[in-house]
Image (tube, helix red, strand yellow):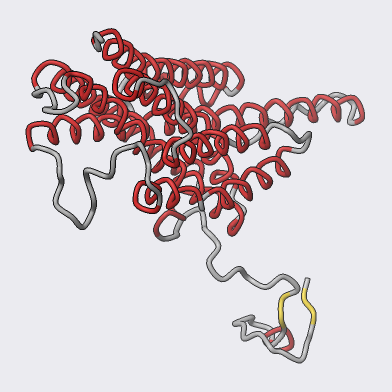
Amino acid sequence: MNVYPFIVASYAAGILVPAALAIAAWARLRRASLRLAAVDPRAKGNIIRRKRGQA
Amino acid sequence: MLRTTGRRFKSAHPCPKLRDVEPAVAPPAAAPSARGGRGVHRFANPGRFLRFSGQVLPWLAAGGIVLTVVGLFWGAFVAPPDWQQGQAARIMYVHVPAAWLALSGYFALAAASAAALVWRHPLADLAAAEIGPVGACFAALCLVTGSLWGKPMWGAWWVWDARLTSMLVLFFLYLGQIALIRAFDEPARGYRAGAILALIGIVDLPIIHFSVVWWNTLHQGNSLGLFSAPTIYISMLWPLLVTALGYSLGFAAIVLARLRAAVLERRIAALLTARAMGAERRPARGGTEAAGLGAG
C-alpha cells in the first residue's frame, strides 16, 4: 500500500489545524482591540501612543 | 462594619475602643492583590496579565512558527524511515506532539479550573474556557493522524484499543467542558460546572499514559519517558522534540491570544453596560451628568 497519501494528509492536518487556530485567535484579538479602541477613547489613545513609540 | 466577639482580632486602630475588635469580614489569608502577590497570583490581575502577555506573545508566536516549520520539514524530508514501519513512521512527527499537547493542555485546563474553584478568580475561569477549544482541536488532530497511521499499519482506521479509546474519552471530556460552559444562562454557573467536569476528567490522563502498560494493546508502547532512556533513534528523536517544542510554543501563543481577546471583550462589555446604565440615569437627574465609563 502506498503510504504517501496518508503522510501528506497527516502533515496537511498538522499544519492547517494550528494555523486555523492561530489565525482565528489573531483575528479575534484584533477585532476586540479595535472595538475597545472605538468604545473607550483612553484605550484608543494608548494604542496611538504605543504606535508612536511613547510610554 | 465591625462587631465584637469572643475571639479578638489584633488591630492597630488609633482608637482604643476599636483596637481589639474583629472585622465582620475577615481579611483573606492569601488574596491576590492588584499591586503585590506571588507566583501565579501576580498574573491574576487583568491589567498585569495584559501587559505581560503583550510582551510575551510575539516571541511565543515567532518561536512556535519557526520551530514547527523546522521540525515538520526535518521529520518529513531529513529524518530516516523506520526499519519496521518505513515511511509511515513520519506521521509520528505530527501525531505524537499533538497527543502530548492534548494531554498537557488538559492538565493546564484542570489546573486553571482548580484555581478558579479555589480562588474564584475570573481570569482562571476565562483561561479554562479558552484552553478547552484549543486542546480539543489538538486531541482531534491526534485522533485523525493516529487514524491515518493506523490504516496503512494495522489495516483499520480505528480499533477499540485501550490507548485509542482513552484518548477518545479525553476528546469527549474537552467537548463536554466546552458545552457545559455554554449551557447555562448565568456564565458563573457554566464556568463552575465546566471546572468540576475538568477536575473529574483528570483521572483520564494517567489512564491514557499507562494504558499501553496496563493492557495488551495494539498501540505501541511508550518510546520516551521522563526517567528512562529513549528507545527511539537519535536522528528521529531530534525532529520529534523540535516539533513538540514548536507545537507547545504555538499552543501557548494561541491560548494567550484568545485569553487577551476574552479579557478585552469582557472590558468592552463592562464599558458598554456602564454607559447604558449612565444613559438610563441621565433623564432622572435632569440630563446634566455625562454617562460614566467603566475603568479599564
In-front residue for pair B115/B35: B115
**How far across and how far down the image is residue B96, in percent?**
30, 33
Residue at 68%, 37% in the rendered image: B180
Quadrant of the rendered image containing residue B36 = bottom left
Residue at 46%, 55% in the rendered image: B41
**How far across and how far down the image is residue A37, in percent?**
53, 19
Rendered view: B44 above or below B139: below
**How far across and how far down the image is residue B54, in percent?**
37, 32
**Could one spot residue B246 in this view of the protein?**
yes
Rendered view: B278 above or below A38: below
Give the number of callouts. Answer: 0
In-front residue for pair A18/B234: B234
For the C terminus of chain B, the image quarter is top right
Residue at 78%, 34% in the rendered image: B185
Quadrant of the rendered image containing residue A32 = top right
**How far across and how far down the image is residue B264, in percent?**
55, 29
In-front residue for pair B120/B233: B233
Quadrant of the rendered image containing residue A9 = top left
Residue at 12%, 15% in the rendered image: B77
In-front residue for pair A31/B182: B182
**Could one spot residue A51 in this view of the protein?**
no
Judged left or right of residue B167, residue B283 is right
Residue farthest toward the right in the current orientation of the protein? B284
For the N terminus of chain B, the image quarter is bottom right
